[in-house]
Image (cartoon, coloured by chain):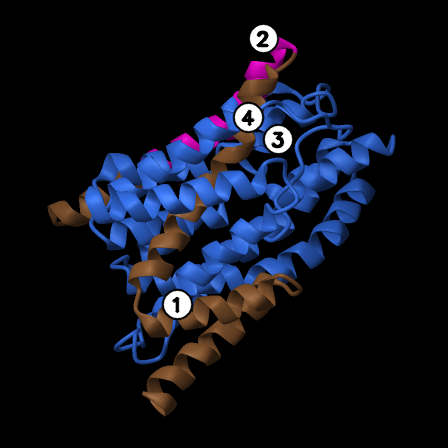
Amino acid sequence: MDAQHLNLLYVIVAAALATYATRFGGYVLITQLKRIPPRLEAALNAVPAAVLTTLVAPAFVYGGFDVAAAMFVAFAIGLRFSTLRMLLVGWVAVMVIRHVIL
Amino acid sequence: MNRDDFRAGLRGGFPVMLSASPFGALFGALAVDNGFSVADAVFMSATVYAGASQMVGIELFGNNVQPWLVVLSVFAVNFRHVLYSASIAKHIRHFTIIQKLLAFFLLVDPQYAETEQRGERGLPVTFSWYLGFALVIYFPWILNTLIGALFGQLIGDPKAIGLDVLLPIYFLGLVLGFRKRDRFLPVVATSAVASVAAMHFVGSPWHVSIGALAGILLAAILPPEHRLRQGPAPVEKEA
């Protein structure tokens, strides 16, 4: 097994432990604190949307015209429909742009 | 173990399993595309078992982001589970310690939502029910990852068949799933601007930490909104 692959296994195990910590952590926290302070809760609540946005916005701005156009179409779909449909329509959009239009 | 409760759990979890299946397969295919082996992908689904963060993990790993930052990002995306486990604590107090250890491992978004609802409606949250609901989602998730990963091995150039747009669109879908939460727009707008600026001025992968931190700080600083909701709202669009 090469070093790169061993590295990946470490990352997966660490990610699994980190995830488990979040799933157990709240239980420990609530039995100690009884109540989570409102500002802490507000910050915690914002974490996933904030992190995921950082994977979306740069892809839209720096990903090229085809990716940006597909994301825009998917966004419009996502306001009404499921993520699965967003993926399907966004995929069709990028394929049309790459293979038909360009 | 109560067989009827276990079966009720299986029935309840079944539709969740169906809707999560394409995402399991998608994860498997994209993981292989990002340099994972089939075994790595299956191993990650079996141990991390949190769809969105697994996608974040493969995206960052594929871009050669430092290992500690990959783990930190997975941790951050999964941080909502702290609120889930805090919130369902009152419903599962009667579980034994071993049962709790297992229950928390299986605490994905729909598991939280169902457990909370069941508890609020006054129905008994038994371990048998909880396990039935969880396992009918967990094992197919692993199997679908395997199927997707085997399929992913057959793909030559992911860009030619448009696979490269799927991750950003998937993440966009997840972000939209949070849009009914407090302070959604200011947080997302702040993180978007900060991450784009960080990408330009500092470079990848710092756009993740800097962008996320900007949105989180804003949420903590803004005056608290009054809410009547009990417990945190689960993610709407995710496996």
Inspect the magenta stretch and tell me whether residue A28 lies in it: yes
Residues flagged by tags 3 and 2 on a common chain:
no
Determine whether, in the image, residue B119 is placed left or right of residue B188.
right
Q: Amino acid at mark 4?
A: Leu
> Quarter of the image containing the C terminus of chain A?
bottom left
* Residues in magenta, as a range: A12-34
x 26%, y 78%: residue: B156
Which colour denotes chain A? brown
Q: Where is mark 1, residue-wise?
A: A68
Q: Position of residue B113 (x, y in %)?
A: 70, 40
What is the number of the mark on residue A32? Answer: 2
Tell me where residue B228 sits by quadrant. Answer: top right
* Residue B75, percent from left and from top: 41, 34
Which of the numbered marks, if any, corresponds to residue B84? 3
Question: Disc 4 or disc 3, which is closer to the eye?
Answer: 4
Residue B222: give its label. 4
Q: Residue at x 42, y 72 (%)?
A: A69
Which chain is the one coloured blue? B
Question: Are labels 4 and 3 assigned to the same chain?
Answer: yes
Report the Cα–Cα distance between label 4 and label 1. Answer: 31 Å
Q: Main secondary structure of the magenta part?
A: helix
Q: Chain of mark 2?
A: A
Say if mark 1 contacts mark 2, CB within 8 Å. Answer: no
